[in-house]
Structures are given as structure tokens and as C-alpha cells.
Amino acid sequence: MSTQAQPELARKSAKAEVCKVAVLGFGTVGRAVVEILTYRHPAAIKLTHIFNRNVASKHVSWVPKDVRWTEDIDEVLASDVDLVIELMGGVEPAKQWVRRALESGKSVVTANKQLIANAGAELIELAQRKGVLLEFGASVAGGIPVLLGLQKGLSGDQIFKITGILNGTCNYILTRIESSGVTFDSALAEAQQFGYAEADPTDDLEGYDARAKLAILARVGLHAQVHPEEIAVSSITPIQPVDFHYANLLGCTIRQVSSAALEGQRLVAFVQPAVIPTTSPLARVRGSENVVISTGKYGGETAFSGHGAGGHPTAVAVISDVLLIAQQRGTAQLTPAKKQELTSEVTTPHYVRFVVRDRPGIIAHLAKVFSKYSINIDAVFQKPGFAKTSLPFVITLEACGRSVLDEALAEIAEADFHVEPPLSLPILKETN
Ligand SMILES: NC(=O)c1ccc[n+]([C@@H]2O[C@H](COP(=O)([O-])OP(=O)(O)OC[C@H]3O[C@@H](n4cnc5c(N)ncnc54)[C@H](OP(=O)(O)O)[C@@H]3O)[C@@H](O)[C@H]2O)c1
């Protein structure tokens, strides 16, 4: 992902024999980046500073002795480094320090999706004004070069849709429930035990992490300006093994799907668990892997898949950006982004799972309410063997809009037979 290279940068780099770099943040990714810079030792790159708070606790013996460890950001920003690699995470103070680096004529590489999703436009504009580069290829799907692929490899097409599995934690949990029938809570505990989920997994499970990545993909691939908080999200936490049973009866499975599509002047964007055919490339992504599928007017579908996270895969993407800057290849002008009318309203068939205290008349009641909202029932599925006091069954609905379904479900939720609120998922048969 490149900002515009300016003559000032070209002059500066032509003079400099080596590109001096500083790493901000010696955590999972920062450590892996320093490791590659130390052992692979790319020509023309010289690591000069490692910055972290409480830096004494971070020291490792394998870093070359001439690298300066510091907890003083002013020292780094006032130094003669050509390039700052920001790997701390979060919007502040990263934004303030990236701004200062760019203002003082240093290029920046970052893996920070929150920073780019929230402040990318102003930082890109600043980099262009100062004649330096801002690269953020590692901010979406870690080690998968999807941003570079969209911006360079597919720039000849007119991309109108990007769909993906962008959160490895959610994908790990959903594929674990699917493969072994464990409960949501057990799958989450397992993901935490193996390091696939944070102690506080809210950002992943609620879709906040994926929507930050989707906002960046929409910016780069669709040239659409969207703030992450404008993108509708729904949680994967209500998904249980019984949902996979019913989805399988439909020839489908369930994944957290992130999607952004241009429809005329509108951008339809959402992150939500959805019922998708088992034949979809999205369904075939297992465990903590990621996939991004772009659809272009001329080139059709292109898929990017692989390890979307992890220290080393992400560090590879970071180093690739550093090399790109050092080699002066990032010269493409950014296509201006436009503000679209944003909506998550899609008209699709739906899967609705109820858990009820069984008694006569429930289906009749549901049919009456759906009919009131002109929603047609497609099929009713009921797996045998459940207690009548907590009976899960599924109704699939013919294509209907999300907002009208939400209204119908709000009315249905008032009935006294529910053991838990109805769960509705779109069936995305057309989505890749
Ligand atoms: N991990 C991945 O798989 C992955 C994948 C793609 C993108 N990313 C992105 O890469 C970035 C780094 O992620 P990570 O997993 O390496 O995080 P991490 O392990 O938490 O490392 C962050 C490092 O930065 C330091 N730090 C944080 N805030 C600081 C501050 N205000 N002042 C000084 N030092 C500070 C932390 O110090 P302490 O140890 O003292 O907290 C820690 O050493 C994030 O933007 C993340 O979203 C990560």
C-alpha cells in the first residue's frame, strides 16, 4: 500500500547508502521484525533504534550491540533514522508519533489496523504533503499481501466487491464448534489456551477487529471512504453446535463474514456470522487462517488466503513494506476515496433459530407474524432428541430485507415461549 513518492524522497534516498530504521514496540510483531532484520540482514537496511516503554525488561542478547534501546520517543524522532516501523498498536499515542515522524521527513511502516482505519486518510495526506511514504500492508490479514495485490496487481480491474474471513479468532472458534461439536464457551477457552484469542476477546467476537480491516480494504480496493464505526456488526457469541447441524442440513456452514460491495452510489458493508454454502471458498478456510476474495468487473474473483496473523507472518509483510520503501518502488498515486451512502441492508434468505418451551400453536404464531410482515417461510427443521423445555428448531425464510425481519423478530420476541432470543443469520448463497 503506497502513498505517492515525491522527488524529495527520491533525492534523499539516492544520496543515502543505507536506510536507517527504528522499531517502535518490541512485542510479538516487533520482536519478529527485529529477528528478521538481524538474521536475514537485508542489504541497505540498518536497524538503529528499538523503542519500548520499560525498555530494560525487553533487552535480548541476540540484537547487534550497536542498536540503541530506548524508552525516549523524542530521541528516536530527533535521530537521523529514515524510516520508523510502528508496531505498538492502538490509535494513541501511535497516531501522534506517526504524525511527528512523517512531519520530520521520515517514512513510516505500520501493522496497526486501528490507526489506519481511524486516521489513515489524514496520515496518507500528510505523508504525500511531506514527500515521504506510509505503508501499511501488514494491517489487514497479517502476512497475506492482499493490500498490495488489490492496489497493484488488480489496479487494472474495477473491483466492486470484497468479501472475507478477516478474523482468525472467530474462524478458529466456529470451525472448532463445527468439527467437534463443543460449546461456544469451550471453543473460546481453547482458543485462549492456544493463544488464538486474547484474554479479553471482545474486539474479535463482536466484529470490531474485522470491521477495522474491512474499512481499510474498502478504502484500498473499492476507493470508498468509510469509518469502521459506521459498519454494522453482529456478534458470533450466540452460535451453538445446533446451528451447524441445521446449517449442514441446508448444505451450508456458518462463518463470520466481512463484506463490502459497491451498488451504484451505495456501499453495502457488514461484519456478521452468516450461513454460507459448504462449497464456498469462505467455508473452506479452517482454523485461524484468513481469506479475502475480491470481485472485479473484468477479472472476476481473485482469492488471497493464508496466515492472517502471528509474529513471523506479519513481520514478513512489515519487512516487505520496508524493502518497498528502500527500493523506491512505491510510486503509485492513491485513487481518491469517495464518501458513499452506507448501509448493511441486504435482501437475502435467512436462517432463524428458535429455542422454545414447546407447546401447541408456536409455529402458527410465528407464521402469522411473518405473514404480517410479508415474509415467506421456506422450510422448518427440527432435530429430534431435545427436551421440550428447551427445544431448538430452525425456520428458513425466503429472501427478505434485514430491517423488516428485525421488526418481525422484535414482535416475535415478545411471545412467552422463548427460552432464549431468536438468532437470525443471512444465508449468503450468492456470496462467493
Ligand atoms: N500479533 C499479530 O498477529 C498481528 C497481526 C497483524 C497486525 N498486528 C498489529 O501489529 C501491532 C503490534 O501487535 P503485537 O501483537 O506485536 O502487539 P504486542 O505484542 O502487544 O506488542 C506491542 C508492543 O508495543 C509496546 N507498547 C505499546 N504501547 C506502547 C506505548 N504507549 N509506549 C511504548 N511502548 C508501547 C508494548 O509494550 P508492553 O510490553 O510494555 O505492553 C509491546 O512491547 C498492532 O497494531 C497489531 O494490531 C498484529
Image (tube, helix red, strand yellow):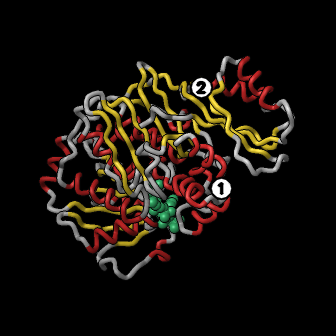
SS at mark 1 in the image: helix
Amino acid marked by disc 2: Glu
Name the spot of residue 96 as percent of width and height, x first. Answer: 45, 48
**Residue under the point 44% across and 56% down:** 289
Q: Quadrant of residue 320?
A: bottom left
**Residue under the point 55% across and 35% down:** 427
Q: Nearer the viewer, mark 2 or mark 1?
A: 2
Name the spot of residue 150 as percent of width and height, x first. Answer: 30, 40
Packing grade of label 1 (10 A; few <14, some 14-19, many >=20) is: some
Please tell me how many numbered marks the rendered image carries: 2
Q: Which callout, 2 or 1, points at the residue further toward the start of the chain?
A: 1
Give above or below for 60 relative to 168.
Answer: below
Residue 184 marker: 1
Q: Quadrant of the C terminus?
A: top left
List the residue tagged with mark 2: 398
- Say whether residue 355 is visible: yes
Nearer to us in this view, 256 or 18:
256
Marks 2 and 1 close (CB-CB < 8 Å):
no
Name the spot of residue 169 as percent of width and height, x first. Answer: 53, 56
Give above or below for 97 relative to 431.
Answer: below
Residue 251 marker: none
SS at mark 2 in the image: strand
Disc 2/disc 1 C-alpha distance (Å): 28 Å
Nearer to us in this view, 136 or 307:
307
Q: Quadrant of residue 49?
A: bottom left
Amino acid marked by disc 1: Phe
Q: Quadrant of the N terminus?
A: top left
Q: Is residue 312 left or right of residue 268?
A: left
**Residue under the point 36% across and 56% down:** 143
**Residue under the point 67% across and 17% down:** 374
Q: Is residue 73 left or right of residue 36?
A: right
